[in-house]
Amino acid sequence: MIHEALTQILSTLPHGVELCAVSKYHPIEALREAYDAGQRIFGESHVQELQVKQPQLPSDVEWHFIGHLQTNKVKYIAPYISLIHSVDSEKLLLEINKQGIKHNRSIPVLLQLHVAQEETKYGFTPDECKELLLSGICQGLQGVSIRGIMCMATNTDDILRISQDFDRAHQFYLWAKSNILTDTNFTIRSWGMSNDYTIAIEHGSNMVRVGSKIFGAREY
Ligand SMILES: *Cc1c(COP(=O)(O)O)cnc(C)c1O
């Protein structure tokens, strides 16, 4: 089932679009099945759960953190995390930098933009994010490497609304890339989940975060 779902999704992704398999709340056996089918990037959104799972899969897995991250928990994942999608405050960015330096690595991160028409989502507004980038704080951080932008669209069936949310994130990415983060490492556009990843790809995504379409419904 997982193998078939993965193959089906991968067959629809254009060249250059990466798949982050969102495995939160799914048992390790499910992740192993995806691993055996060739999947290497897994997304988790709770530190405690990630800590339990990480040692149980081979070391060539790339673990991505996609949920809201509390600054006091960065230290637990800092040694091994491959990408933190969800940097939503300056305080968090600076803590990741501190932990990166401590572990002698530059931790790849994305800045999370709040573009949805919902209060419940985390992230910088485009204005806040612009201010952060213009402040110069992001330049010269040794323990963190800003690789791109992440967002979630409004949770709705309205394709136009979803498209507009992704377009805002894409416009912001293009602005940041041509004005601030002009180095070649700033390349990732992480948007699109099970219900909207095909729309996301049409609107600039090159990393989709798909959970339930691979693993089935989550049991909380
Ligand atoms: C849970 C989650 C996903 C995956 O959601 P599905 O609808 O199961 O594909 C993607 N991104 C984030 C940030 C999530 O928390």
Image: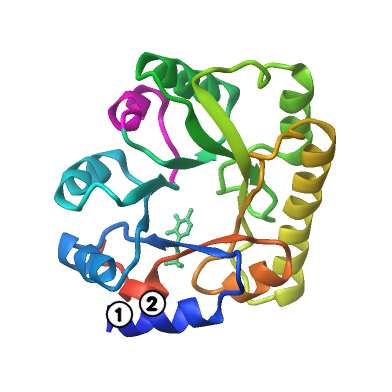
Where does the image place residue 11, in percent across and percent down from the top left?
A: 50, 82
Label 1: which secondary element? helix
Q: Nearer the viewer, residue 178 or 199?
A: 178
Q: In which quarter of the image is residue 37?
A: bottom left
| Picture quarter with ligand 1 | bottom left
Residue shown at the point (40%, 30%) measured from the top left: 70
Looking at the rendered structure, which numbered label has been put on residue 3?
1
Q: Position of residue 212 (x, y in %)?
A: 38, 72
Q: Can residue 70 be found in the magenta stretch?
A: yes
**Which residue is found at the position 70% from the left and 67% from the top?**
162
From which residue to which does the magenta span run? 67-79
Q: Label 1: how many residues lie within 10 Å, few (<14), some (14-19) or many (20+)?
A: some
> Which amino acid does the dot numbered 1 rest on?
His
Q: In this view, does 24 lie to the left or right of 138?
A: left
- Tags 2 and 1 touching, CB below 8 Å: yes
Q: In which quarter of the image is residue 104?
A: top left
* Image disc number at residue 125: none
Q: Which residue is drawn at 62% across and 71% down?
A: 156
Mark number displayed over residue 6: 2
Q: Is mark 2 on a helix, strand or loop?
A: helix
